[in-house]
Image (tube, rainbow, N blue to C red):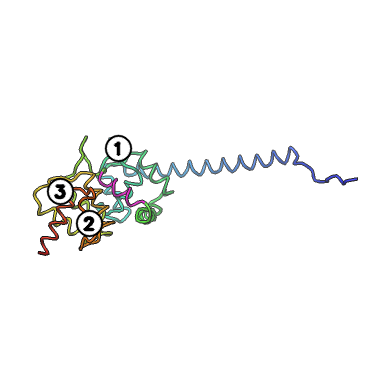
């Protein structure tokens, strides 16, 4: 005759105890997240304008001072990208929460570390998205779709200079002396990024003008080649 198992099913009290433990854990996690959000909000209000309720350029300069970085540092632009800030020079509370909740940064010390983490994240896996965002963030007027040459030169140097220095320096030089273009649009901006990643420079051995490059890049290549004679 087969032996019956002596193993007993969990009692109601055991199941109830496990459920209580889970509930306590959830409650503790919820309280911790709530406190973290409170600290994030407190930091926001330390830099926001009392009249507008948002962080304006003056507040951003104050933030940069506390973070010990210049307001023109590319990492501040990366921070705006992490927040998905819409208006240049301004951070709303929702944008601030989006960025610093993702970074788990609720103090100046953590924010300093977060700047390093953002830089690594951008360079490792999200540079194309950041590069595109940098252009959109610089569109300061409603329905604006292009950026003037002087501003685009500064933006190129800031955003792409550390990764493609030779190409950026040459393109900036060309932009400053050419007279055909007064502004750069998104297609040209993204085209130059693709150019830096795909084209052998400065010999252009794999550059084919029939591959639908923006015309400004055809002109740029012709200009460099003409300089060589």
Q: Which residue is mark 2?
A: 207
Q: Please tell me whether mark 1 or mark 2 is closer to you in this view.
A: 2
Q: Which residue is mark 1?
A: 50
Please give left or right for residue 178 compared with residue 130 in the image: left
Work out whether 15 lies above or below 162. Answer: above
The reply to whether the C-beta atoms of the residues labelled 3 and 2 are less than 8 Å apart is no
Of labels 3 and 1, earlier in sequence is 1
Quadrant in the picture for residue 169? bottom left
Q: Please tell me whether mark 3 or mark 2 is closer to you in this view.
A: 2
Q: Residue furthest front?
A: 210
Count residues near mark 1 (Cα–Cα under 10 Å), then give few for <14, some for 14-19, many for 20+: few
Of labels 1 and 2, earlier in sequence is 1
Task: Look at the numbered disc 3 and give the secondary structure of its residue.
Answer: helix
Q: Which quadrant of the rendered structure holds the N terminus?
A: top right
Quadrant in the picture for residue 119? bottom left
Please give left or right for residue 132 compared with residue 25 in the image: left
Q: Which residue is mark 3?
A: 149
The residue segment tinted magenta is 126-135
Of labels 3 and 2, earlier in sequence is 3
x and y percentages locating residue 44 in the rendered image: 35, 43
Between marks 1 and 2, how big is the CA–CA gap? 54 Å
Q: Please tell me whether mark 3 or mark 1 is closer to you in this view.
A: 3
Task: Look at the numbered disc 1 and give the secondary structure of its residue.
Answer: loop
Work out whether 38 lies above or below 159. Answer: above
Q: Residue at x 75, y 39 (%)?
A: 11
Count residues near mark 2 (Cα–Cα under 10 Å), then give few for <14, some for 14-19, many for 20+: some
Q: Which quadrant of the rendered structure holds the C terminus?
A: bottom left
Q: Is residue 195 magenta?
A: no
Q: Is residue 130 magenta?
A: yes
Please give left or right for residue 79 compared with residue 223 in the image: right
x and y percentages locating residue 176 in the rendered image: 12, 53
């Amino acid at each position: 005759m087969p032996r019956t198992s002596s193993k007993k099913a969990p009692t109601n009290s055991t199941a109830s105890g496990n459920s209580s433990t889970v509930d306590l854990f959830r409650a503790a996690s919820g309280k911790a997240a709530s406190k973290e959000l409170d600290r994030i909000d407190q930091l926001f209000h330390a830099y926001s304008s009392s009249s507008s309720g948002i962080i304006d350029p003056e507040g951003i300069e104050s933030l940069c001072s506390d973070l010990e970085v210049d307001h023109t540092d590319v990492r501040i632009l990366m921070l705006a990208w992490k927040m998905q800030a819409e208006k240049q020079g301004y951070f709303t509370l929702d944008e601030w929460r989006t960025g610093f909740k993702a970074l788990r940064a609720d103090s100046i010390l953590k924010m300093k570390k977060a700047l390093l983490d953002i830089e690594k994240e951008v360079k490792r896996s999200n540079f194309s998205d950041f590069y595109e965002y940098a252009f959109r963030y610089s569109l300061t007027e409603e329905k604006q779709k292009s950026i003037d040459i002087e501003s685009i030169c500064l933006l190129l140097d800031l955003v792409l200079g550390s990764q493609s220095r030779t190409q950026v320096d040459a393109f900036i030089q060309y932009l400053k002396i050419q007279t055909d273009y007064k502004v750069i649009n998104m297609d040209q901006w993204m085209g130059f990024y693709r150019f830096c990643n795909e084209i052998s420079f400065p010999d252009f051995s794999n550059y084919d003008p029939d591959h639908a490059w923006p015309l400004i890049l055809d002109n740029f290549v012709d200009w460099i080649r003409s300089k060589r004679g």
